[in-house]
């Protein structure tokens, strides 16, 4: 059985003109991109548009990909920017503004229970109250599980800046949950967090 | 400092536990077809050929042969004109020779200017170095004086700061925070 081509091999083949190889990259990473977009607060029914936009941008700027970074890190960067652009464009639409991400997102993922879904919807709502520059590193670190170095690369920021933004983002999230969503604070951690 | 780091770690753990439901959320999409279609639509379409496919190769070959024949004809004409002493060809040769001669003289003149400038710069540099060498004791003395002045300035500043601290009114941390708009 032939070994799966690596990301770098696929990128090189696409750049050499074998565009059909890009389909393998899309198949390989579409779940990661869609999940990251969902966790960045994009409603489920709009994730397909964002994912489409992300992969089209990836294809158009493939010659700028630096092999020293993992392809997934680069994809995170493009997904984060596309999600922020998408949300900015939605803000211009008054109707979309009335529809909160929690209400718009009523279809559960495969691994979610009803309780989880409700909590996740409220958490996404709470996260929307954070400014973009705090929410993005917070989601990449604590939801996507990326290490600080990867977050710094994905956001094109120094590690020190990411750390200080994370610290402020956590403090602000704690304050938002304490004031507006007290039921979301995990039991047993109330003392540690207060 | 240690306490702050511990607080940060606790806050990180708290955030990790709080955001756990979001980590269990997954999204499945299949955008392969739409992405590949979009890419295909954005690429320039090949221009349709005027000739049928079976005539395309002979057409290429004929174009190459015609181009080579034109080149041979022109070269032969030029050689024959030169060989037979054609006045037009002679004028062209004279013009080319004049251009070449002008280029040569221009290059020579430029080289001369560059050489003269380099020699002047070298002489100036040497003069400067000699001057610096002669004045080195003065430079050293100025350096020592500057170092002494620096040390005196630091000592004076330390004296001023220690006096100011001794005479400053006592302020509690809480009131400092209130005055500076920080957390109480």
Image (cartoon, grey):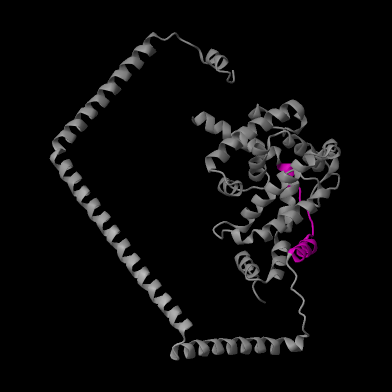
The quadrant of the image that shows the C terminus of chain A is top right
Q: Is residue B37 magenta?
A: yes
Q: Is residue A117 visible?
A: yes
> In front here: A39 or B121?
B121
> In front here: A132 or B13?
A132
Left or right of residue B11, residue A186 in this image: right
Q: Is residue B31 above or below residue A123?
A: below
Residue extending farthest to the front is B87
Q: Position of residue B129 (x, y in %)?
A: 18, 45
How many numbered marks does the figure carry? Answer: 0
Q: Is residue B114 above or below residue B166?
A: below
Q: Overall secondary structure of the magenta stretch?
A: helix
Q: Position of residue A134 (x, y in %)?
A: 65, 37
Q: Is residue B23 visible?
A: no
Asked where in the image residue A185 lies, by quadrant, the reply is: top right
What segment is highlighted magenta in the picture? Answer: B20-42
Q: Is residue A7 above or below residue B184?
A: below
Residue drawn at x 74%, y 56% is A31
The quadrant of the image that shows the N terminus of chain A is bottom right
Residue drawn at x 62%, y 90% is B65
Q: Is residue A21 above or below residue A166?
A: below
Residue drawn at x 82%, y 37% is A97
Q: Position of residue B132 (x, y in %)?
A: 18, 41
Q: Is residue B45 magenta?
A: no
Left or right of residue B42, residue B68 in this image: left
Residue drawn at x 64%, y 34% is A170
Asked where in the image residue A26 lies, by quadrant, the reply is: bottom right
Q: Position of residue A3 (x, y in %)?
A: 64, 73
> In front here: A87 or B175?
A87
């Amino acid at each position: 059985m032939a070994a799966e081509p690596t990301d770098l091999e696929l990128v090189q083949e696409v750049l050499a003109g074998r565009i059909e190889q890009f389909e393998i990259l899309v198949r390989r990473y579409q779940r990661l991109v869609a999940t990251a977009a969902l966790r960045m607060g994009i409603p489920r029914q709009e994730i397909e548009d964002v994912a489409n936009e992300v992969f089209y941008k990836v294809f158009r700027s493939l010659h700028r990909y630096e092999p020293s970074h993992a392809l997934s890190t680069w994809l995170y960067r493009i997904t984060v920017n596309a999600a922020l652009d998408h949300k900015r464009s939605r803000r211009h639409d008054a109707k979309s503004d009335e529809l909160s991400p929690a209400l718009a997102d009523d279809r559960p993922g495969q691994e979610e229970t009803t309780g989880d879904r409700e909590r996740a919807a409220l958490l996404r709502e709470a996260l929307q109250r954070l400014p973009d520059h705090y929410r993005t590193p917070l989601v990449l670190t604590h939801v996507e599980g990326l290490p600080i170095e990867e977050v710094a690369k994905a956001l094109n920021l120094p590690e020190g800046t990411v750390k200080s933004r994370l610290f402020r983002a956590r403090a602000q999230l704690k304050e938002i949950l304490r004031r507006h969503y007290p039921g979301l604070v995990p039991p047993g951690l109330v003392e540690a967090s207060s | 400092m240690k306490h702050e780091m511990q607080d940060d770690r606790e806050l990180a753990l708290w955030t990790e536990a709080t955001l756990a439901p979001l980590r269990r959320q997954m999204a499945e999409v299949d955008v392969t077809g739409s992405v590949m279609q979009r890419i295909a639509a954005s690429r320039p379409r090949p221009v349709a050929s005027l000739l049928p496919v079976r005539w395309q190769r002979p057409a290429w070959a004929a174009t190459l042969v015609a181009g080579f024949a034109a080149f041979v004809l022109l070269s032969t004409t030029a050689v024959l004109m030169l060989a037979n002493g054609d006045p037009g060809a002679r004028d062209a040769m004279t013009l080319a020779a004049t251009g070449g001669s002008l280029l040569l003289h221009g290059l020579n003149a430029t080289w001369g200017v560059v050489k003269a400038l380099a020699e002047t710069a070298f002489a100036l540099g040497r003069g400067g170095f000699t001057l610096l060498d002669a004045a080195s004791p003065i430079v050293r003395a100025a350096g020592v004086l500057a170092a002494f002045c620096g040390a005196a300035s630091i000592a004076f500043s330390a004296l001023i700061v220690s006096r100011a601290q001794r005479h400053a009114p006592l302020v509690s941390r809480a009131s400092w925070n209130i005055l500076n708009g920080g957390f109480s």
